[in-house]
Amino acid sequence: MSEFIRDIVHAMKSIRTERIPPEMAAAPQPGRLVVLRVPGKEGGWGLVVNRLEELLSQQLTALMLDHDLDVQVRSTDRPGLEIAIDGRPVAVGIDPSLQANPAKLMATVDDRLRRRLSILLGPEPDPVSAYLVDHGFSVMRDSSTPSGLDPWMIEQSEIPDVSAEEIGERELAARPPRLRLEVAEHTLRRANPRPDAVISLRKALFAQKGVHFPDLELVPAAVPPGQVRLTANDVRVGPFELGEDAGWDDVVERPLRAFLLHHASWFVWNHDIKSAFEEVAFALPDMGATFLECYPRQYMLTACVRNFVREGRSVRNLARILWLLMEIGPAGIDSEKLSFSENPLLRDPTTVPNAQRDPAIVAARVRKCLAEEAWRVGLLLMPNPTRIPQHVESALLSAHDPAALAAAEWAAVDVAANYPRNATVVTSSVHAVALVHKALRALPHRLRVVAAQELPPGQRLDG
């Protein structure tokens, strides 16, 4: 596949890179204001505050961020516990009775925080840094990370057709996903009826998600029996308390399986995607050549695949994804408009159309193709489509400062909290999909967010 590599090298020549000065990595950052909103009186939450500070400090250290924390407790007339960082929602609708069980409460908060770790970067983070952190990697590579590409920056204004996602994928290509499990020796010594438990889990998850999960680094640790600590990429998860009677099967089937299912997008790696593409191109050379003509940069494909995995879709059939990416062609996608394309439409050799350089637009148009195909055979991929109010969407798109963005995110959360758990949230513009989805990660349930153009013909839209 030397032609493939040659095309990639040629496509990346226009990107200027430079080393990040060491003093930039060491510079301390402003503190983060963390607010715990509680129903009723503010007193009696000291233990929870301490545990919350420990949790946030652990993640800040893992991500190599130097922030001070100011955790405050404030009363609210809302029914559940809420946590905000710099005014933006992190976790809402938490059962107040968990005050009596701080460990379970922190596990809930940790799960919500991992859905949008970039909120720890501050109100206006660099989009590339946010992309790295949201997938469990620190902005700066530590000494244990395998060498590959040097840390680098890029002026987005100088190269307008390179998205933050592509730049982030280039950096992530040099950082293989990692899984490290620390388990008590007592747990490891317990009888294991299935010595191939991890192998079986990896096979099952690949069949379900289409993602190759990394090898597991197993470390016996001096922790209480039944306790498990997990490190995924650079992020610490847990500890999980499984009980003294827990064995290896319990470790694999409970915390490990659940984490991998919920964070499968963290383990999408450009190396795996490129290898899978080369297999398809070897079997179907015309498809491979046509795809490279439409999408000459390798990181676009990885960014799209990661997007689909984040939505809970399987990416096992890469050939099908490649075909749909070519089928959508270079046509753009505007608010409330329906577009049709021939099959396939090649790009203009003198330019890179917006629809082929923005992963969000590309992913939206592929989802549209999938929804229409399912609709033709009577399947429903987007149940209970409910439009988010236009004023909420407009506020998110037009937010010009951190305070306005925080207010818009709270408005989106308040509205969507009343939607059915399996609802599909619909925006008018494809550009609002990512903004709405980030805000709604604070909710207890995970909602799918799509643009109105993605709905198949004839599907009723509420709201």
Image (cartoon, rainbow, N blue to C red):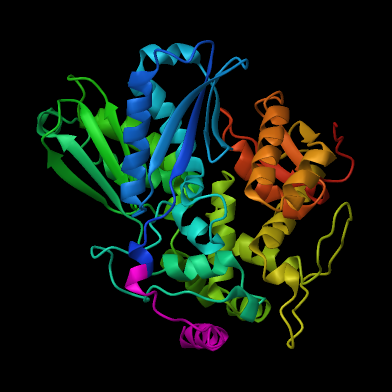
Number of callouts? 0
Going 32% across and 71% down the picture, which residue do you hit? 22
Q: Residue 457, how many percent across, how many down?
A: 88, 45
Residue 422 vertical position relative to residue 172 in the rendered view, above or below:
above
Q: Is residue 13 magenta?
A: yes
Indicate the position of residue 83 as horizontal and vertical percent values: 51, 30
Q: Is residue 405 above or below residue 252?
A: below
Image x and y of residue 155, in percent: 57, 76
Q: Residue at x 15, y 26 (%)?
A: 224
User: Does 138 lie within the magenta span?
Assistant: no
- Picture quadrant where residue 200 is located: top left
Quarter-wise, where is residue 458 in the image? top right
Tell me where residue 186 appears, x and y as whole percent. Answer: 10, 28
The magenta segment = 1-23
Question: In the picture shown, does residue 79 fall above or below 8?
Answer: above
Q: Out of 214 and 70, give the one closest to the viewer.
A: 70
